[in-house]
Amino acid sequence: MKLVTEQFGSGEPVLLIHGMGSAATAWKPIIPALRKTSLVITVDLPGHGKSPMDFAQPMDPKS
């Protein structure tokens, strides 16, 4: 599974994970403030933003 991530700034890491139907770009407004003191890491979950959907994984409701 390939996930697209981006990093901004340096310091203690802060991982930003978007909600369903969104993408890492949702965090764009707050990244400038956070990157002043932290290493900000954003991720696009599978099938969102720039991360492709991996159809090789099971897609049943129990997954």
Image: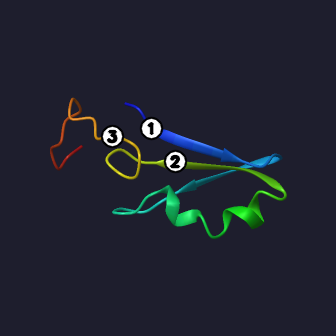
The residue nearer to you, when weighing 15 against 47, is: 47
Circles 1 and 2: CB atoms closer than 8 Å: yes
- Residue identified by numbered label 1: 3
The image position of residue 3, as x and y in percent, is 45, 38
Say which amino acid is labelled 1. Answer: Leu
Q: Residues within 10 Å of mark 2 (few under 14, many from 20)?
A: many
Contact (CB < 8 A) between labels 3 and 2?
no
Q: Residue at x 24, y 43 (%)?
A: 63
Res 28 → quadrant? bottom right
Q: Residue 60: name its quadrant.
A: top left
- Give neighbour class at mark 1: few <14, some 14-19, many 20+ (Cα, 10 Å): some
Q: What residue is pinned by disc 3? A: 52
What's the amino acid at mark 3? Answer: Pro
> SS class of the residue under badge 2?
strand
Residue nearest the observer in this picture, 58 or 44: 44
Left or right side of 21 for 63: left
* Location of mark 2 (residue): 43
Residue at disc 3, secondary structure: loop
